[in-house]
Image (cartoon, rainbow, N blue to C red):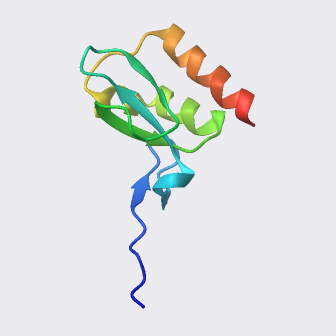
Amino acid sequence: MKQKKVPLRKCNGCGAQKPKKELVRVVRSPEGAVSLDRTGKKPGRGAYVCPNADCLAKAKKAKRLERVLECTIPEDVYAEMEEALKDDA
C-alpha cells in the first residue's frame, strides 16, 4: 500500500519543519482579525508556530507573524495567544 504524504509546515518561531498537525495555526481572517486556529480550517491567511509560548515569543520579537500575515498585530492579540498556549500546556 502507498504511504500517505504528511504535509510539513515551518514554525515561524524556531524554524523547524514539523507535520502540520503538530503546529498551531495563526490566521488573519478576511476581515483582518488575527487569532489562533486550533482546527487549521478557518478561512484566511495562515502562519504556523509550535504549540509553546517560546516559539510565539521568538516570532513576535522578529515580527515574523506580521510579515507572513501582512498586517500589524496588536499587543493584546499576542497576549491572548500566549494565554491560550499556556492553558494547553
**Viewer-nearest residue: 1 or 20:** 1
Residue nearer the viewer, 63 or 1: 1
* Name of the residue lying farthest toward the bottom: 1
**Image vertical order of residue 73 relative to residue 3, above or below:** above
The quadrant where residue 81 appears: top right
Indicate the position of residue 8 as horizontal and vertical percent values.
41, 61
Left or right of residue 83: residue 50: left
Q: Nearer the viewer, residue 62 or 3?
A: 3
Residue at 46% of width from left, 54% of height from top? 20
Q: Position of residue 43 (x, y in %)?
A: 30, 31
Taking 62 as reference, is 57 left or right? right
Query: Left or right: 37 with respect to 29?
Result: right
Kindly give the residue lying farthest to the front in the view shown: 1
Q: Tell me the residue at 34%/36% (across/down).
A: 46
Q: Position of residue 45 (x, y in %)?
A: 28, 33
Q: How far across and how far down the image is residue 62, in percent?
A: 44, 31
Q: Quadrant of the N terminus?
A: bottom left
State which quarter of the image contains the C terminus: top right
